[in-house]
Image: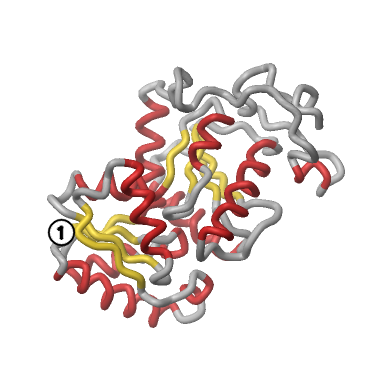
Amino acid sequence: MRLLVMNPNTTASMTAAIRVTATAAAAPGTEIIAAQPRWGPESIEGHFEGYLSAAAVLDRLATFDTPFDALVMAGFGEPGREGAQELLDVPVLDITESAAQMAMMLGHAYGIVTTLDRAVPQIRDRLLTAGLLQRCAAVRGTGLGVLELEEDPERTVEVIIETAREVVRAGAEVICLGCGGMAGLQERVAVALGIPVVDGVAAAVKFAEAVVGLGLTTSAGRSFAPPRPKVIGSWPLSTHLRPSPGRAQNTPRPAAFSAQTSGI
């Protein structure tokens, strides 16, 4: 089994950290490929950068030239997953819903610790859309920017633990780390708190393995039906950024949706 784990930003060090966490969570025989968009923001801290990233991720997927059995999208609370579900013929999981779903298996209420406070409404909206907000006790920001997470790892862990304690006081029995850049910190936070801490990357990898193992994939019956063939000017952009792009063996889902029928 081969899983593609997609970092939604263009920071290579974060992609590497996500790869380490995904590989540690994967079962023997599961191969992890970690990738990032060819263009887009270096970090995502708001709706503007989120939508830019969503387009960049879809662009990367449309030109990805290595086959994979499932996709894990490693952006917390960010848009684009539904587009990937339409585009790909393999299961697509994101770390937001995967973390929350796993947390609800472990306790009555869960909470999320994320980066900046401005990310909180975006995450809550995502949980509401997914039907997962009812059992969320609280979402709190640490005040750390995404790129700041890597600057001082010890300070990052301290701030996450301090913020997580606030979330526990709000009623959470399980904590979710609300940023792909926090990958790998769950064990230290769990020891400090004495309750389960879920890393979304690890949770999504395990769910992806289960879905693929059961032979299941996204339903194309209605909501996530393949994109209709139409002209999309200058897309995918990555085609113009490298000399010899390869078409993804996983995409597009319908044979009719191609560079030719899309007018590219």
Q: Considering only vertical position in the picture, is 121 above or below 143?
A: above
Name the quarter where the C terminus is drawn: top right
Residue 75 on image: x %, y % = 48, 53
Front one among 209 and 141: 141
Q: Secondary structure at mark 1?
A: loop
Residue bearing the label numbered 1: 173
Q: Residue at x 35, y 71 (%)?
A: 141
Residue 235 on image: x %, y % = 75, 39
Q: Residue at x 56, y 49 (%)?
A: 34
Q: Residues within 10 Å of mark 1 (few under 14, many from 20)?
A: many
Q: Considering only vertical position in the picture, is 151 above or below 258?
A: below
Location of residue 210 by image quarter = top left
232 horizontally vs 116: left or right: right
| Residue type highlighted by circle 1 | Glu
Front one among 202 and 147: 147
Residue 140 on image: x %, y % = 30, 68
5 horizontally vs 237: left or right: left
Q: Considering only vertical position in the picture, is 244 above or below 161?
A: above
Q: Residue at x 60, y 26 (%)?
A: 227
Location of residue 15 by image quarter = bottom right
Residue 110 on image: x %, y % = 21, 56
Front one among 175 and 53: 53
Q: Residue at x 49, y 37 (%)?
A: 82
Location of residue 123 by image quarter = bottom left
Q: Considering only vertical position in the picture, is 6 above or below 42?
A: above
